Image (cartoon, rainbow, N blue to C red):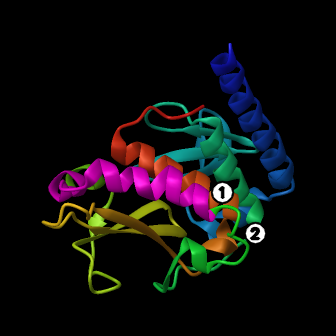
Amino acid sequence: EQYAQGKWLKRDLAEDALVWARARAASMKLEDLPGRIGGEIVELEGRKGLKLPYFTGHVFICGLDIQKIEGDDLTRWEQVFILNHLAQGGRAVPRGRWKGFVQFPNTVSKVITMTKQVEEPLSERFSGKKDELLERSLAIGGQSVADIEGSADAAILFRPLPRVPVVLLFWDRSGEEDFMGQVRLMFDETAIEHLDIESIVFLSERLKQLLCGEPPKS
């Protein structure tokens, strides 16, 4: 019964977050979106909307309705961070200057979530499995890039959204028994112009799910 109540609570939180995100995005103007966040205005099934690249596919945004053009339906959490992306009002083009999540302001309450729900699970899943990490990254649109810190065994660039790139740094397991592989996500310094802090976490959790082959959370 407690498990069932817990599942209900998570669904309720997702629905509340989606209602809030829709309210934030309600005043957006379709014609402003391509210049702000990328994509192009197209007509799909008689409806005019924004076709926006999303990982290896696209989403179609018409009013407050968001759907994938290819593949499965979006989860509510995906809709939340995409709607918040629309509502945030950012226009900045990524500058290629990278920051760890903790380096952004007002992240204190979310750093543990990022660590425990994203970076540590990725570290455990791919420790000693760099080739598998690279393979799975390629499958969702990632590409190897020059290490931005000079010490990682792999640096992988993802573009889940055109203006929100993410770099995954991976230090693989060494021969020492007490050292496990380590993952750290890095974000362009303009990320907070395009997403609020919670939405950066939601996006990161989705990236982790895709890399680990986990089913999406509704």
For the residue pair 52 and 114, the one nearer the viewer reads as 114
Amino acid type shown at disc 1: Ser
Type of amino acid under label 2: Gly
Circle number at residue 89: 2
Residue at 22%, 58% (x, y): give it. Answer: 134
Q: Which is more N-terminal, label 1 or label 2? A: 2
- In this rendering, does residue 41 appear at all? no
Give x and y (percent) for residue 51.
56, 51
Magenta-colored segment: predominant secondary structure = helix
Mark-to-mark CA distance, 2 and 1: 14 Å
The residue carrying pointer 1 sits among few (fewer than 14), some (14 to 19) or many (20 or more) residues within 10 Å by Cα, namely many
Chain part drawn in magenta: 111-134
Helix, strand or loop under label 2:
loop
Whether residue 184 is in magenta: the answer is no
Q: Pointer 2: residues within 10 angstroms few (<14), some, or many (20+)?
A: some
Q: Does the magenta portion include 125?
A: yes
Q: Residue at x 20, y 52 (%)?
A: 135
Task: State the residue at coordinates (84%, 54%).
Answer: 24
Res. 73 visible in picture: yes
**Camera-side residue of 185 and 121:** 121
Residue 126 x/y as whole percent = 26, 52
Which quadrant of the rendered structure holds the N terminus? top right
- Toward the top, the furthest residue is 1
Per the rendering, the mark at residue 199 is: 1
In the rendered structure, the answer to whether residue 177 lies left or right of residue 205 reads left
**Image quadrant where one finds the C terminus:** top right
| Percent coordinates x, y for residue 181 in the rendering | 28, 62
User: Quick check: 136 left or right of 67?
Assistant: left
In what element is the residue under mark 1?
helix
